[in-house]
Image (cartoon, rainbow, N blue to C red):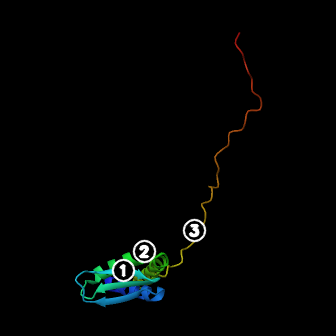
Amino acid sequence: MSPKKKLELLEQTCREIGVKLYYDDLRSEGGFCRLRDTYYLILNRRAAVETRVRIISEALAKIPQAAERAALAQAQAETKAAVAEAPAPVQAEPVEAHPAPQPPAESHPVVAPLAEATVTTQK
């Protein structure tokens, strides 16, 4: 999945769980905080997409419900992408059933069991 798609997915997760996400001109990459049970994530608008993805991912990992939702959303997005990129299934041709091998008409003679056994002992 491309970094831009990951960023969009993470931003959507933030909106869904109520994390306030702000982009602004900062001297640093950004930060995450909680004020009165509301989570805030402030990011440098000039940060690279990969940096934004990393910061948001780290912040969401600190929120128990967010970590589960983010992982589930990412897995769903990756599955959709994999299905979209997968080649179309190839239609298999029917395979002819081969008959089981038959024993030859002439069978080998079977050794008959001994009718009587003689036991000799040495003295």
Q: To which residue does mark 1 refer?
A: 32
Q: Quadrant of residue 105?
A: bottom right
Tell me if residue 88 can be seen.
Answer: no
Dot in front, 3 or 1? 1
Q: To which residue does mark 3 refer?
A: 98
Q: Residue at x 70, y 12 (%)?
A: 122
**Tag 1 near tag 2, CB within 8 Å:** yes
Residue 49, x across and y down, in percent: 28, 84
Disc 3 is placed on an element classified as loop
Q: To which residue does mark 2 refer?
A: 62
Compared with 113, 90 (above or below) is below
Quadrant containing the N terminus is: bottom left
Give the CA separation, mark 3 to mark 1: 68 Å
- Which numbered disc, 2 or 3, marks the residue that appears first in the sequence? 2
Disc 2 is placed on an element classified as loop
Residue 43, x across and y down, in percent: 30, 85
Amino acid found under the numbered disc labelled 2: Lys
Compared with 116, 99 (above or below) is below
Quadrant containing the C terminus is: top right
Amino acid found under the numbered disc labelled 3: His
Q: Residues within 10 Å of mark 3 (few under 14, many from 20)?
A: few
Mark sitting on residue 112: none
- Front in this rendered view, residue 83 or 115: 83
Q: Is residue 114 left or right of residue 74?
A: right
Amino acid found under the numbered disc labelled 1: Phe
Dot in front, 2 or 3? 2
